[in-house]
Image (tube, coloured by chain):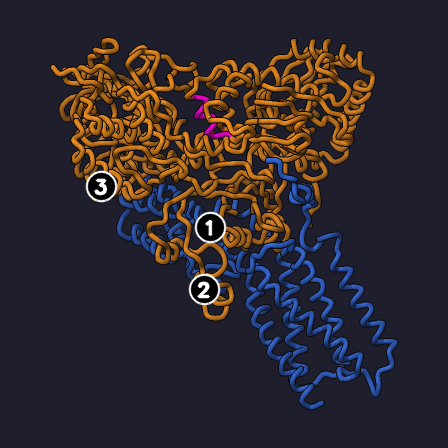
Amino acid sequence: MASIPGNRYAQDEKRRSADHVSFLKHKRFRYLWVALILSLLSIVGYAFIDQEPRPNGGSWYGYTLGTIGLLLIVWLSLLGVRKRKITEGQWSLKAWTSAHVYLGLALIVIGTLHTGFQIGWNVHTLAYVLMLIVIISGIYGVYTYATLPSSLSSNRKEMTRAQMLEALTALDRQLEAAAQPLDREQSDLVIDALGQDVFYGGALARLTGAYPGCKTKRALKRIDPNGSEAEARVHTLLSKRSDQLAQIRRHLRIRALLEVWLFIHIPATIALLAALLAHVVSVFYYW
Amino acid sequence: MDLYKVAIIGSGPAGLSAAGRAAALGMSHVLLEKTDHLSDTIFKYQKGKHVMATPSNLVLRSDLDFDAGKRETILGIWDEQSAGQTLNVKLNAEVTKVEGTKGDFTIHLKGGETVRAEAIVLSIGTQGNPNMLRCPGSEHPMIQYQLDDPGEYFDEHITVVGSGDAGIENALGLAADDAQRNIVTILNRRDSFARAKAANVALLEEAERDGRISVRRETSPAEVKDGELVLETRDGQETIPCNRIIARTGSQPPRGFVEAMGIEFTSEDRGAFPKLTPAFETTQPGIHVIGALAGYPLIKHCMNQGYDVIEFLNGNTDLKPADQPILEEKFAGLPGNHSVEHWLDVFNSNVQVFQGLSPLQLRELMLDSTVHAYEPGEVIFRRNEPGSSLFTIAQGSVAVEINPNDPSITVPIGEGSIFGEVGLISGRRRGSTIRAAEQVVAIELARNAALKLIATSPEASDAVNRIAIERQLLQMFGSGLTPKDIAPLVEAAEVIELRAGQVLIDEGAEDKEVYIIRRGSMIVEKALGDKPVFLSYLPAGSYVGEMAAIDGSKRTATVKAAIKSEAIRLPGEEFVALLDRNPALREKALKEMEGRRKTTAFIESRKDEFGGAVDLYSETAQFLVDEGLGEATDVLLIDEKLCIGCDNCERACADAHEGLSRLDREAGRTYAHLHVPTSCRHCEHPHCMADCPPNAIKRGPDGEVVIDDTCIGCGNCQRNCPYGVIRMDPKPPKKPSLLSWLFFGNGPGPGEASYKWRKQHGDPEQPKQAIKCDMCSGIDGGPACVRACPTGAAIRVSPDKFLTFTKLTEDVE
């Protein structure tokens, strides 16, 4: 009992009263400032240091920029490991993300200056282009992270993914019972709607949210809401089903938009690392 | 008819062990069991359940064996040993009445048979008997009180009576498979299913819409006949076909049955136990109570008591309880090398709050307590340490540092008194540092033990209350005051309890009382325009209402309980008189008052200019209080303006803790994009702690509420948690490393492995235990969920720091 309170209490109190701000605003834009200063220094150096015979990746200044760039790229790509390796210690993934975004943007300046604006059809330019692809896809990623989460939240209406699917299953059960009195043709419409895979349509449907040929929609159109009692009930249930499907599909769409850029960002990063290796090896080989 | 030396009623672990000892001693005995098998409580455990054997430091003293293992194994061993050891067991023997006195009791059994015995050992547990239907025909054989396997009935008209979870779950089970072609009806006396879980009610209503279950509200059974059931409905009587009735209308606690024998309980409290002597004898001579009914829910305790009680009856009065070695070990560190009995005597005579206890109760209390010996000057606890245990001083005295800035100013607390009661009552951190003033022997009662003591001993309850009020006043008003100064206030003080939402102070009222919140928390609201606006949050330890007392004005705001709370009410005049006598105190109170006025004025001014922001603040604060923030100490919130739904928080949680996540990000409520996920709030008074048989739930050194490895997997905490944050799962197997997943695709990857993977790779013998957030206790860097959030959406906050205008209206993006 008579233990001396460690620094955990102070640390906890600090955490509990910490500001809650996004990764972009982290520590009052600390990494934005670091990136700006780094970029500015690179530009000033480029402008004022006399590089002979001309600005080039092979001058001492070019090597300096190249080394900084290489180290940055390797470090930035380690975010993927940091995210998955939950070790002890005072790190915060938010700080890492913040640094990743701003220092990644600074690479546009550092990398471009490193090229000395010498672009050609070679492995060196390949690395440069890949880097730009990674950065551009990343910019899109930051844009989605900043704009989409609140619509994801509003669409969810406090439901979990599992609950959304459960709600759909419950509606399906009710539809099956309610459709019993319908005639053959109309029952077939309902059977088709229930039989259709909720996730049909593939990647394109998922990203656009457009599901042409949705059989629930079709059944909804063809069953008369003012018809018999059974028809009216089925119609109501079908429109609930349609709403439920729409919610699930919006959820999938937003999630897909939040993730789709990673399908470029990550492979491009791996290609970039390979290209960089080739770039560095060839530079030293032909030195 | 034979006169047995002892009749043992109930064949659970306690009764069985008693019978085993009687058989071993050759004492004439009979073991009466109401069902057709031994040990019904354990028999009713779910198939294959792993039964734990805690506390592990307690030796088993019984003629029957018991060790942790599967339900089937344990029951098998007991069946075999009770047959082998010639126990005289009488099954299907339900006791209806006990007559007679010590030396010659007559026990009436259902069916008219009687048994005579010189002494009785009651070991009937706390399960009680199911409530019977209260209508003609309630003895009909088609009525049953339990449903083991809903899959075994076909083509039947089945009526379930009862509107609780048990009834609903049975009805759903019976109607689950259409192929059984059962026609299921459920009866509810009332018009809503208010007692059941919302999820069960939703499923029932869905089944009703689908026509799978006929739900009859405001209907009760009127008469049971062969093949039919007469119903009493709102519109008169109606008869339905019926082949089977499942009655799930709760059960009768055994207390009535026990009291009918003339046995007294310690109090009217529902949790009270029978009054017992050290030999387990009740106030009715010749009748002994052991096991769960005596307040010992763990199997090992029960079996030891079964052994002990028979030894006592056999005249072995020197028998030391089985806990003797544990107490010897506990007391070994105390000065002077005295015996256990010496110390128990010292504690009993010196410590005020122990004086109403029997030796048996004191021994039991010691098992859940720690004894300490402190050297002069040694720190016992420090200010701001978490701690909810209660200390009693058996020898010596301590010094309380009342001014955090000047440790030399102290107030003494003398021998026999208590300290630490503020932490116990408020559930908050220690208010001051306490040192030993001389050689001190102190007993530290764990929170549960202290609460049990207060609940069972009126003397202890009074003493704690009186001391707590005085100390709270002293602590509140800071340095310079002596107990003499505040004596008139203490005299006039009164503790009032408030339920969540109950109003303490009404805006505009003219009363002048001052209140100290000693438990729970309050919110302050003011009507601005036409609706109440949240002004501030008051944690336990705050005082409120002083403005009206000082300047005689009307109440300027409404104060109401955020959660179940307790406040000390002080008369306004006495409070003002105290201020008049102490100018320094007056200064302090005025300053605090000024601060509060400023907050109000600030929010009022904002209301005019930025009405929207104030409404958002007020409504968000109210939402968070409704979600349990009022009793939280550290809670995970997710700002859904930032959350990308990557679930890295859940994965980090699982990877920081043996592979199971203790939080469900998506589940839970959301208001204005602020989401309260299903995750532990580390309550000031944790509901989960209320009923933990092995006392496995504790508050850790950093304020976290943790469940340790002694958990027996009973699931009580899971049921008691109002926020649904506790899960029951076996420890999963170790996963292959991150790198071998990354490069070779080995294992399930980061985060919680799927149920299937855990099942395939796990040890099937691994018992289910309760799992919940431990705030990453012992992990450098703190909570992994927060550290692993890539966007800053996940934050952990405490209510006093977060329920402020600035925090709630912060622009996060």
Q: Is residue A242 above or below residue A115?
A: above
Find residue B623 and name its label.
none
Q: Residues within 10 Å of mark 3 (few under 14, many from 20)?
A: few
B518 sits to left or right of B547: left
The residue that label 1 is drawn on is B660
Q: Say if the magenta span includes residue B364.
A: yes
The chain containing the residue under callout 1 comes to B
Residue type pointed to by label 3: Gly
Q: Main secondary structure of the magenta part?
A: helix
In depth, the one of A133 and B288 nearer the eye is B288
At 61% from the left and 43% from the top, the residue drawn is B796
The chain containing the residue under callout 3 comes to B
The residue that label 3 is drawn on is B151
Rounded to the nearest angstrom, the CA distance separating label 2 from label 3 is: 41 Å
Mark 2 or 1: the one toward you: 1
The residue that label 2 is drawn on is A202
In the rendering, what colour is chain B? orange
Q: Is residue B439 above or below residue B775?
A: above
Residue type pointed to by label 1: Leu
Residue type pointed to by label 2: Gly
